[in-house]
Image: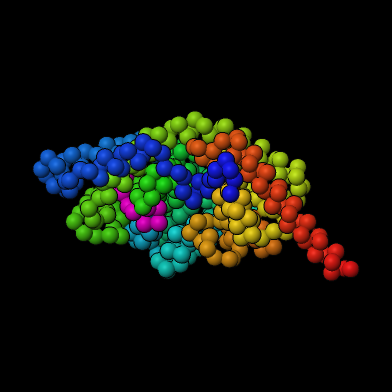
Amino acid sequence: MSEAGPIYLDYNATAPVKPAVVDAVAETMLLAGNPSSVHGFGRDVRRRIEDARERIAALLGCAPPELVFTAGGTEANNTALRGAGRRALIVSAIEHPAILRTAEVVADDLVVLPVDGEGVLDLGALDAALAAHGADALVSVMLANNETGVIQPVAEIAARAQAAGALVHCDAVQAPGRIPVSFAALGVDMMSIAAHKFAGPKGIGALVVRAGLDIAPLVTGGGQERGLRGGTENAAGIAGFGAAAALAADDLARAGEIAVMRDGMEARLRETEPDVVVFSAGAPRLPNTSCLTMPGVQSETQVMGLDLAGVAVSAGSACSSGKVEASHVLRALGASDAVGGCAIRVSMGWATTEDEIERFLGAWRALYAGLTNRWKAGVSAAAG
């Protein structure tokens, strides 16, 4: 472990919570009322929820009543796919498992659209799918990929889909606080987000549902959230969600600085080893995300070796990081399992510093040199 303290470079899994968010959660947890109660205690909690709803709506460019609180991004995605009532689901090959696995269960007809070598959706394939399914379809495409950071042309996708009579859902979980997000400008019918991706609490998210769109609730109960999500609201989590949304403008202001750190890191690794592959480097990406290879070294070995050096990174999605398997995202980009199996994701955020990137580079180089020298020694011994 580094004497200077551990380095956290796994923001796409979960961003470290900000102190003001902790304060908002703690203050709200001390309030006694149920937000559905009409007395003063209940109204106080309700006020906290609605204030948070307004802050989050301002961040997302939607109207506050369009925001439905859920237990996280996965529930929001499930609500969209299951509640839309469309027989056909059209999704991209690089969607999060919360979309892909749900679509496999829900859809009567499932169309998985290819992406190009940079990870951008094939719009011609989308047009063909829309021509076949039209008004029976729900299109679900993420705004920014969790592994590579590639940004999809969602507004154009939405325009094409809606012209064909399809509904459109966008998993925007990775985007807030990293790039500007506007539900209205994207033109989609539904959009999922999760607080913990931009320094809010874990276990709280939201589905934005276009005004006038009728969908079936995933969780029924007492009629909370306009009848679209039953159960007493997680008031403390929602308050923290709102606090994180209010602070997200600070993260957006720093996006350019983070992109410079990310690009410099990638360039210096390529100087160290020209065979390093940086996925989706030729496409628009989130400024904080880098998916890259250590040639010849398995992802799990890198993650463990860097962890021992005090650096936290990941190998793909946090939801599947415990599984030793090739990334479906990198396969969709055309990467072989041999190359994709050597990839890690480095994701930065609000607390990342230049010093931490320097220390990561040192740890990466030391790990690579050590493993390479060990391999060369083994080859030499075998030859002797």
Residue farthest front in this picture: 3
Q: In which quarter of the image is the C terminus?
A: bottom right
> Residue drawn 39% across and 43% down?
200
Q: Is residue 83 left or right of residue 177?
A: left
Q: Give the range drawn in magenta.
A: 67-75
List x then y, in percent, for residue 333: 63, 56
Residue farthest left in this picture: 39
Q: Which sits in the foreground, 352 or 170?
A: 352
List x then y, in percent, for residue 57: 34, 38
Q: In this view, does 277 lie above or below 110?
A: above
Q: How is the image coloured?
A: rainbow
List x then y, in percent, for residue 174: 48, 46
Q: Is residue 210 left or right of residue 178?
A: left
Q: Which sits in the foreground, 162 or 16?
A: 16
Q: How many marks?
A: 0
> Residue drawn 85% across and 64% down?
380
> Residue drawn 48% across and 33% down?
252
* The stretch drawn in magenta includes residue 227: no
> Residue drawn 64% across and 39% down?
358
Q: Is residue 119 visible?
A: no
Residue 185: image quadrant is top left
* The stretch drawn in magenta includes residue 74: yes
Q: Is residue 178 visible?
A: yes
Q: Is residue 59 left or right of residue 269?
A: left
List x then y, in percent, for residue 285: 58, 43
Q: In this view, does 249 lie above or below 306?
A: above
Q: In this view, does 362 lie to the left or right of 140?
A: right
